[in-house]
Image: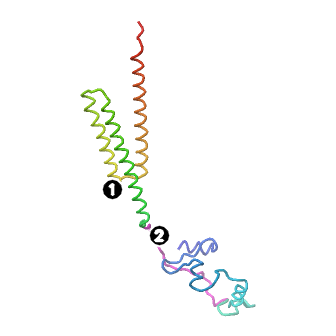
Amino acid sequence: LFAQWMHHAYPHECPYPHEAGKTNPQTPYEWMKVTGNSQSEASKQEMLQQVESDTCASEGPHEGHGCGEEEDPELPWSEAEELLLIQKPGMDDEGSFSLTKVGLAIAMAIFLVGFMAVEYRRSLHRPSGKDRQQQQPVNVWLVAALVLTVLSAYFLGLLNGIAVACAFGLGLVAISLRHGSARELAGKGRQGVGMKLPK
């Protein structure tokens, strides 16, 4: 109803709100195909013929068929009201969304395999110690379990894809900073071994 009021107040800016299924909009090409016309625009001669054939084109204000008081002075108004509904995404949207999910899952799986391989290589190069050998597999499997839990929650629709991607990126930054600081400390430790203590 509000859209009808807006159309009557601003007829050039706001189109008339037709009821759903009552009209069959066509593009100019479709209209030319149906009617057999070669162009969609009227010529000046056709426009003048339309103006001259107007039933209200008379000298007096009430002469002619459908003019003056015979015409309904009220604006056309329809009491039918339609509510706008949110439509479910189509097949194309679902397909692209599933491709996003698959891409994210592949990226996280590659990261998980790479992370486990790097940690396994590190555990081979570290000096043997009961504490380190016992703690290292727990950390790797903890990360693996966390990634699998996040992936499962994402595929079940419990997590937002943007939130998962942001958390994934921040996790990569945190891991790289942690490994960078560990390398720096290891380098300082090696320098300290070669230095002689003052007497």
Residue count near mark 1 (Cα–Cα under 10 Å), binned few <14, some 14–19, many ≥20:
few
Q: Do tag 1 and tag 2 residues touch (Cβ < 8 Å)?
A: no
Residue 127: quarter of image: top left
Q: Quadrant of the C terminus?
A: top left
Residue count near mark 2 (Cα–Cα under 10 Å), binned few <14, some 14–19, many ≥20:
few
Which residue is painted at 33% across and 39% down in the image? 117
Residue 8: quarter of image: bottom right
Position above or below: 163 against 74: above
Position above or below: 151 against 137: below
Question: In the rendered structure, does residue 154 fall within the stretch colored magenta?
Answer: no
Give the residue type that dot 2 points to: Leu
Residue 28: quarter of image: bottom right
Q: Considering the numbered disc 1 on the image, is that residue within a helix, a strand or a loop?
A: loop
Foreground residue, 25 or 28? Answer: 28
User: Mark number for residue 156?
Assistant: 1
Q: Which residue is identified by label 2?
A: 84
| Percent coordinates x, y for residue 146 in the rendering | 32, 44
Q: Residues in magenta? A: 68-87
Left or right: residue 11 versus residue 177 is right
Foreground residue, 81 or 141? Answer: 141
Left or right: residue 80 versus residue 141 is right
| Percent coordinates x, y for residue 35 in the rendering | 59, 86
Left or right: residue 64 versus residue 113 is right
Position above or below: 29 against 173: below
| Percent coordinates x, y for residue 143 in the rendering | 32, 41
| Percent coordinates x, y for residue 128 in the rendering | 27, 27
Give the residue type that dot 1 points to: Leu
Cα–Cα span, label 1 and label 2: 29 Å
Which residue is painted at 26% across and 27% down in the image? 129
Characterize the magenta stretch by its predominant secondary structure. Answer: loop
User: Mark number for residue 113?
Assistant: none
Question: In the rendered structure, does residue 83 fall within the stretch colored magenta?
Answer: yes
